[in-house]
Image: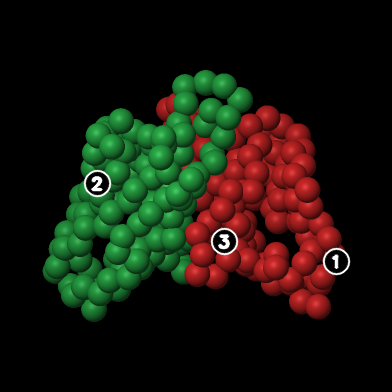
């Protein structure tokens, strides 16, 4: 089955602009989470959505927001871009369950990411 | 706060064994996962420890000690293709939904 798809793969913006990134999870996966990856900080958790509701949020300013649609597709938006927002933004999905052996095993399926450069 | 500490770099030769340690400090800890990421690629899941002890998956094994807030990833019979970054990640939060990642360990395998 198809993996996690992120669009666009690469984009260049200037300071002050805003950007929207899209993520289509693996079919049947209802949980989507977003991460920011930079060389110095590794992967930092942005937020997780499940059934169109934000379930967890990382320590990022309000300029970073997201949403999830009824088909589990998710978007994240960054407004008023800053140079420091340049990063690889990774989306991950999983088949989140309420129980069973593999419940909350931490197995995420990542997309290839959207590389954002802010000039 | 929540944090995971792991070495930034490890080097080894083909055929050797290497251990990547990870210590964590998180609230509502559920378990520890390990991910591999090659340059330019997406992180891929390697293993998960929800209970104390050793989990073995082929050449890779992972260990967890909750009492010590410590885990490690053991890579045996190293191959050149194992050169990559390795991340430990703690599943935490209510219902174990959030993953907090360490900053990664870059493993370089030479011949």
Answer whether residue B88 is visible to the viewer in this image.
no
Residue B91 percent location from the top left of the image: 52, 38
For mark 1, name the chain: B
Label 1: state its secondary structure. Answer: loop
**In which quadrant of the rendered image does the C terminus of chain A lie?**
bottom left
Q: Residues within 10 Å of mark 3 (few under 14, many from 20)?
A: some
Residue at 45% across / 49% down in the picture? A2
Gap between marks 1 and 2, in whole Å?
45 Å
For mark 2, name the chain: A
Residue A97 horizontal side relative to residue B18, left or right: left
Which residue position holds label 3? B37
The one of A77 and A95 positioned closer to us in this rendering: A95
Task: Check whether the beta carbons of the residues at disc 3 and disc 1 lie within 8 A of each other.
Answer: no
Chain represented in green: A
For mark 3, name the chain: B
Colour used to depict chain B in the structure image: red
Which residue position holds label 1? B15
Specify which label sits upstream in the sequence, 3 or 1.
Answer: 1
Which residue position holds label 2? A66
User: Which circle marks residue B33 in the picture?
Assistant: none
Residue at 63% across / 32% down in the picture? B50
In this rendering, do the residues under marks 1 and 2 share a single chain? Answer: no
Q: Is residue A26 above or below residue B109?
A: above
Label 3: state its secondary structure. Answer: strand
| Corner quadrant of residue B65 | top right
Residue A78 horizontal side relative to residue A48, left or right: left
């Amino acid at each position: 089955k198809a993996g996690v798809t992120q669009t666009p793969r690469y984009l260049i913006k200037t300071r002050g602009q805003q950007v929207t990134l899209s993520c289509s999870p693996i079919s049947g996966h209802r949980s989507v989470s977003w991460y920011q990856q930079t060389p110095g900080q590794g992967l930092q958790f942005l937020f997780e959505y499940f059934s169109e509701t934000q379930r967890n949020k990382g320590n990022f300013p309000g300029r970073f927001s997201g949403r999830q649609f009824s088909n589990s597709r998710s978007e994240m938006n960054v407004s008023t871009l800053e140079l420091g927002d340049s990063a690889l933004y990774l989306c991950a999905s999983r088949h989140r369950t309420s129980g069973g052996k593999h419940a909350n095993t931490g197995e995420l399926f990542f997309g290839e990411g959207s590389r954002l450069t802010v000039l | 706060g929540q944090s995971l500490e792991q070495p930034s770099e490890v080097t080894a030769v083909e055929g050797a064994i290497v251990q990547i340690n990870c210590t964590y400090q998180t609230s509502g800890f559920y378990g520890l996962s390990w991910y591999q990421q090659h340059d330019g690629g997406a992180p891929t899941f390697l293993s998960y420890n929800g209970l104390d002890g050793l989990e073995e998956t082929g050449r890779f094994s992972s260990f967890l000690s909750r009492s010590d807030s410590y885990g490690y990833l053991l890579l045996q019979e190293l191959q050149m293709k194992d050169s990559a970054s390795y991340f430990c990640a703690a599943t935490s939060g209510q219902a174990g939904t959030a993953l907090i990642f360490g900053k990664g360990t870059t493993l370089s395998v030479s011949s």
